[in-house]
Image (spheres, rainbow, N blue to C red):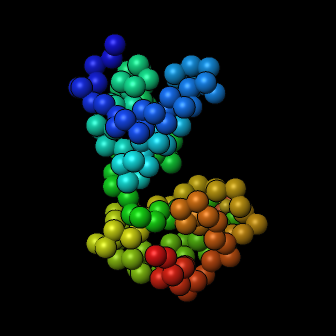
Amino acid sequence: MADTNGARLPDEIRDAIDALRPRYPTEEALLLPALHLAQRHWDGWLPDEAIEAVAHELNLTPAKVYGVVTFYDLYHQKPVGRHRLRVCTNLSCALRGAEEVLASLKNHLQVDENEVTPDGKCSFVHFECLGACEQAPMMMVDDDYRGHLTPESVRQIVEELD
Ligand code: FES
């Protein structure tokens, strides 16, 4: 058994993981959905306690789980805003003004990348290609795509959240 400092998942997450188990051939294969469930429970991020609890639940080493969490951009190890903005700055978006959009967003929110606004509403990161180059420049707002952004429209989108 891996040393997980006694961390345990809440019962409702353990039940949700149990419900998924028949669909996955191994505990390791279950790791990504288990992390999503834990991240949702911990308000959008994964503190050490959550990572160790997932490791315990799946009988994996914490090092294995940390490795997966740090590999994928969709898992967060710091608190995030209620709305998470991912601004694509890859080639197609860059050619169509992504840097100006990003600067406008940062100026509007008055926080740096990976920081949360004082009201807890938003955090943002720049991202590599999000697979919607035809909408360049674009960003994801939580799970939605918003495209053909301008420095003005990105501020308007943020204003309309919540
Ligand atoms: S380069 Fe921005 S979505 Fe592909």
> Residue 55: percent from the left, percent from the top?
38, 26
Left or right? Give the position of 129 relative to 42.
right
Residue closest to the eye, 131 or 119: 119
Q: In this rendering, would 69 be left or right of 28? A: left
Point 50% across, 65% down: residue: 85
* Percent coordinates x, y for residue 53 in the rendering: 34, 31
The reply, left or right, for residue 86 in relation to residue 134 is left
Give the quarter of the figure containing the N terminus. Answer: top left
The front one of 132 and 2 is: 2
Considering every residue shown, the one lying at the far right of the view is 134
Residue 9, horizontal then vertical, whole percent: 35, 34
- Name the spot of residue 110 as percent of width and height, x first: 35, 77
What residue lies at 29% left-to-right and 38% top-to-bottom?
A: 48
Q: Residue at x 49, y 36 (%)?
A: 16
Q: Nearer the viewer, residue 18 or 34?
A: 18
Q: Taking the image as drawn, is residue 87 in sight?
A: no
Q: Is residue 85 above or below residue 75?
A: below
